[in-house]
Image: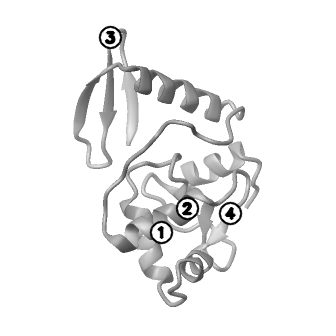
Protein backbone atom coordinates (compact mmCIF):
# COMPACT_ATOMS: atom_id res chain seq x y z
CA UNK A 1 0.00 0.00 0.00
CA UNK A 2 1.22 3.48 -0.83
CA UNK A 3 -0.15 6.66 0.65
CA UNK A 4 -0.46 9.85 -1.36
CA UNK A 5 -2.17 13.06 -0.42
CA UNK A 6 -3.17 16.43 -1.77
CA UNK A 7 -4.33 19.45 0.19
CA UNK A 8 -7.58 17.87 1.34
CA UNK A 9 -7.48 14.10 0.96
CA UNK A 10 -5.41 11.09 1.86
CA UNK A 11 -5.42 8.42 -0.81
CA UNK A 12 -4.16 4.91 -0.37
CA UNK A 13 -3.14 2.83 -3.34
CA UNK A 14 -3.28 -0.91 -2.78
CA UNK A 15 -0.69 -3.28 -4.20
CA UNK A 16 -3.22 -4.18 -6.90
CA UNK A 17 -3.41 -0.51 -7.93
CA UNK A 18 -6.83 0.29 -6.49
CA UNK A 19 -7.17 3.87 -5.28
CA UNK A 20 -9.06 4.56 -2.06
CA UNK A 21 -10.06 8.05 -0.98
CA UNK A 22 -9.92 8.64 2.75
CA UNK A 23 -10.78 11.95 4.34
CA UNK A 24 -7.95 13.16 6.48
CA UNK A 25 -8.48 12.31 10.10
CA UNK A 26 -6.34 12.75 13.15
CA UNK A 27 -5.22 9.13 12.72
CA UNK A 28 -4.28 9.53 9.06
CA UNK A 29 -2.37 12.73 9.85
CA UNK A 30 -0.54 10.93 12.67
CA UNK A 31 0.27 8.03 10.33
CA UNK A 32 1.67 10.33 7.63
CA UNK A 33 3.75 12.14 10.24
CA UNK A 34 5.05 8.82 11.56
CA UNK A 35 5.91 7.57 8.06
CA UNK A 36 7.78 10.79 7.36
CA UNK A 37 9.75 10.36 10.61
CA UNK A 38 10.45 6.71 9.78
CA UNK A 39 11.84 7.59 6.34
CA UNK A 40 14.06 10.23 7.93
CA UNK A 41 15.41 7.56 10.28
CA UNK A 42 13.92 9.22 13.35
CA UNK A 43 11.07 6.80 14.17
CA UNK A 44 11.68 3.27 15.36
CA UNK A 45 8.22 2.27 16.63
CA UNK A 46 4.87 3.20 15.10
CA UNK A 47 2.17 4.31 17.51
CA UNK A 48 -0.69 4.40 15.01
CA UNK A 49 -3.19 1.69 15.92
CA UNK A 50 -3.66 -0.82 13.14
CA UNK A 51 -6.11 -3.60 12.49
CA UNK A 52 -5.51 -6.29 9.97
CA UNK A 53 -7.46 -9.33 8.93
CA UNK A 54 -6.31 -12.56 7.38
CA UNK A 55 -6.16 -16.24 8.09
CA UNK A 56 -5.17 -17.29 11.61
CA UNK A 57 -1.78 -18.36 10.23
CA UNK A 58 -1.21 -15.01 8.49
CA UNK A 59 -2.12 -13.13 11.64
CA UNK A 60 0.39 -15.19 13.68
CA UNK A 61 3.07 -14.33 11.14
CA UNK A 62 2.16 -10.64 11.09
CA UNK A 63 2.18 -10.53 14.89
CA UNK A 64 5.65 -12.09 14.85
CA UNK A 65 6.83 -9.53 12.29
CA UNK A 66 5.81 -6.72 14.60
CA UNK A 67 8.06 -8.18 17.30
CA UNK A 68 11.19 -7.92 15.12
CA UNK A 69 13.05 -4.93 16.56
CA UNK A 70 13.96 -1.95 14.39
CA UNK A 71 17.40 -2.37 12.85
CA UNK A 72 17.38 -6.17 13.04
CA UNK A 73 16.09 -9.01 10.92
CA UNK A 74 15.04 -12.64 11.13
CA UNK A 75 14.85 -15.41 8.58
CA UNK A 76 11.64 -16.95 7.30
CA UNK A 77 12.69 -20.12 9.11
CA UNK A 78 13.13 -18.27 12.42
CA UNK A 79 9.64 -16.79 12.09
CA UNK A 80 8.23 -20.26 11.33
CA UNK A 81 9.92 -21.63 14.45
CA UNK A 82 8.70 -18.69 16.54
CA UNK A 83 5.08 -19.33 15.62
CA UNK A 84 5.42 -23.03 16.36
CA UNK A 85 5.63 -24.51 12.88
CA UNK A 86 9.32 -24.87 12.00
CA UNK A 87 8.65 -26.38 8.57
CA UNK A 88 6.33 -23.56 7.45
CA UNK A 89 9.02 -21.16 6.24
CA UNK A 90 7.54 -21.03 2.71
CA UNK A 91 4.10 -20.34 4.16
CA UNK A 92 5.68 -17.54 6.21
CA UNK A 93 6.94 -16.07 2.94
CA UNK A 94 3.46 -16.29 1.47
CA UNK A 95 1.99 -14.55 4.53
CA UNK A 96 4.60 -11.79 4.16
CA UNK A 97 3.57 -11.43 0.52
CA UNK A 98 -0.06 -10.92 1.59
CA UNK A 99 0.86 -8.22 4.11
CA UNK A 100 -0.96 -5.02 3.10
CA UNK A 101 0.54 -2.91 5.91
CA UNK A 102 4.11 -2.72 4.69
CA UNK A 103 6.56 -0.92 6.96
CA UNK A 104 4.20 -0.93 9.98
CA UNK A 105 4.06 -4.73 9.79
CA UNK A 106 7.73 -4.95 8.80
CA UNK A 107 8.01 -7.87 6.39
CA UNK A 108 11.10 -6.16 4.97
CA UNK A 109 12.90 -7.38 8.12
CA UNK A 110 12.62 -11.00 6.99
CA UNK A 111 15.37 -12.50 4.85
CA UNK A 112 16.36 -15.88 3.46
CA UNK A 113 18.23 -18.46 5.55
CA UNK A 114 21.29 -17.81 3.39
CA UNK A 115 21.26 -14.19 4.69
CA UNK A 116 20.20 -12.89 1.27
CA UNK A 117 17.33 -10.63 0.40
CA UNK A 118 14.44 -12.63 -0.94
CA UNK A 119 10.87 -11.75 -1.77
CA UNK A 120 9.24 -8.40 -1.24
CA UNK A 121 5.98 -7.32 -2.87
CA UNK A 122 7.45 -3.97 -3.90
CA UNK A 123 10.82 -5.28 -5.04
CA UNK A 124 14.14 -6.19 -3.48
CA UNK A 125 15.66 -2.75 -4.08
CA UNK A 126 13.03 -1.13 -1.84
CA UNK A 127 13.48 -3.88 0.75
CA UNK A 128 17.20 -3.12 0.79
CA UNK A 129 16.51 0.62 1.12
CA UNK A 130 14.12 0.08 4.05
CA UNK A 131 16.69 -2.07 5.84
CA UNK A 132 19.38 0.55 5.18
CA UNK A 133 17.14 3.26 6.72
CA UNK A 134 17.21 1.07 9.82
CA UNK A 135 21.00 0.68 9.66
CA UNK A 136 21.00 -2.92 8.38
CA UNK A 137 23.50 -3.81 5.64
CA UNK A 138 22.89 -7.04 3.77
Q: Is residue 49 left or right of residue 36?
A: left
List x then y, in percent, for residue 137.
76, 56
Q: Nearer the viewer, mark 2 or mark 4?
A: 2
Residue sitting nearer the eye, 38 or 62: 62
Disc marking residue 73 = 4
Q: Are marks 1 and 2 in contact (CB under 8 Å)?
A: yes
Q: CA distance from mark 2 to mark 3?
A: 33 Å
Residue marked by disc 2: 65
Which residue is rendered at x = 54% and y = 80% of the image? Answer: 80
Q: Nearer the viewer, mark 1 or mark 4?
A: 1
Categorize mark 2 by other alpha carbons within 10 Å: few (<14), some (14-19), many (20+): many
List x then y, in percent, for residue 50.
43, 44
Secondary structure under the numbered disc 1 in the rendered image = helix
Secondary structure under the numbered disc 2 in the rendered image = helix
Which residue is rendered at x = 27% and y = 26% of the image? Answer: 22
Q: CA distance from mark 2 to mark 4?
A: 9 Å
Categorize mark 1 by other alpha carbons within 10 Å: few (<14), some (14-19), many (20+): many
- For the N terminus, the image quarter is top left
Q: CA distance from mark 3 to mark 1?
A: 35 Å
Q: CA distance from mark 1 to mark 2?
A: 6 Å
Secondary structure under the numbered disc 3 in the rendered image = loop
**Which circle's residue, 1 or 4, is located before the other in the chain?**
1
Residue marked by disc 3: 8
Residue marked by disc 1: 61
Amino acid sequence: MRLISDDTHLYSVSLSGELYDSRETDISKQFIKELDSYFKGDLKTFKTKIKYSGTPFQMKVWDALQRIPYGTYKTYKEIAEEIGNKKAFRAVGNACNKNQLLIIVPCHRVIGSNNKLTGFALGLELKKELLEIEGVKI
